[in-house]
Image: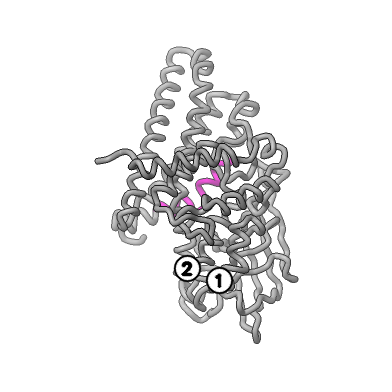
Amino acid sequence: MRLSFDPRVEEVRAEFREWLAVHRPPPEEMAAEPSRSTGHLPGWARRFVRAMFDAGWLVPGWPPELGGRNAGPAETLVCLEELARARVPRTTNVQGLGIVAPTIVDHGTPEQVREHALPILRGERTACLGMSEPGAGSDLAALRTRAVLDGDEWVVDGQKVWTSGANYADLCLLFVRTDPTAPKHRGISILVVDMDTPGITVRPLPEIVHPDAPDLNEVFFESVRVPAANLVGELNDGWRMANGSLAHERGMVWVTAVMGLEQSLDELLREAPELLAAMGPGERQLASDQLVQMAIDTQAARCLGYRGFAKLQRGGSAPEQALMKLYASECRQRIARVAAELRGADALELGGDPLDGHAAVDEPQGTWLEQYFQSFANTISAGTSEIQRNIIAQRVLGLPRG
């Protein structure tokens, strides 16, 4: 068993680290101009995305014309590790770069790639993902937003909710029902919709952690007319493409999830001596046991991520992907909860310093109590913990559907 990367991969890591040292956005610039939502690219983020695209570091595994350098999965992995280690987000428009652009590249026409995907990859436009609906949050097949073909246009009516970044995004990758007579897993299609189209209303949802910069939104569609040419992939093939879209999100998400977990633990361990010194013997022993367990959990999460990655690299299936999403998000929540409990009232004032309220790097941000509140979103986004448990039970353990 080999537990290290080969020299060629480490050469790529060293090359990217040198490039990043020169081109990374200045921390003071990032702090002075924070992202207002995951659909918003501040000036420094636009420039950095474009610089990465031009240098072939944005999506290393893609060809140069798409912002890559035809690198392998391991080279892509170490680049993401270096970004997370440097606490620099590849982009603040995580859905656009991580899901929307890859879906258009995989399933769209050359014209759609040129008109919609490339502007996202060059940092010129941002995109959101229109999946969840009232009553159809984690159950995409239950969506009711409809699109009816009228000549050379689709007419869209319906509502989406929890749409991250819709309040600033230029585009929406919208999942709609195009055949209401088909079984619920069928009859779903995908449209690229310009968010400036008449008939679209975006209503931001208040948030506890970032009340002045909400990211989640309700989006209403009333007789919204979308060019027929904006249909992505085959008609009524949206369910299959949706699985590919989420695979893009989850394929490498474990890297930033694990490194965010490690950064949270490091933050807590820096505070631990002061916290433990103020405790009585029994309380100190209990707190020490919790810290040791969280350190073990964090190391286990990294090992789990590498195991799944190695399987994918060999072309096999990797149930560790579902396990990783569940495990890392709940470990992160435990760290924030324990830190808040140990700090007591001080948890409202002390904790990780916020870099950017909506940064793509999954790093400690805000007070420990804010981190704890935010951790609940991590157990919901990209597939709730409940859904992950169902996937693990059915597809990994082979248990019957309840």
Residue type highlighted by circle 1: Ile
Q: Residue at x 56, y 35 (%)?
A: 364
Range shown magenta: 374-389
Toward the right, the furthest residue is 198
Horizontally, residue 279 falls left or right of residue 116, namely left
- Which residue in the protein does label 1 denote? 190
> How far is mark 2 from mark 1, CA to CA?
8 Å
Image coords of residue 261 (percent x, y): 48, 37
The kind of secondary structure the magenta stretch mainly shows is helix
Q: Residue 128, relative to residue 38: is it above or below?
A: below
Q: Residue 213, relative to residue 344: is it above or below?
A: below
- Which residue in the protein does label 2 denote? 241
What sort of colour scheme is used for the picture?
Answer: one colour
Query: Is residue 22 visible to us here?
Result: yes
Quadrant into which the N terminus falls = top left
Say whether residue 384 is magenta: yes
Horizontally, residue 399 falls left or right of residue 349, namely left
Horizontally, residue 235 falls left or right of residue 71, namely right
Number of residues whose C-alpha sits closer than 10 Å to that of mark 1, classed few (under 14), some (14–19) or many (20 or more):
many
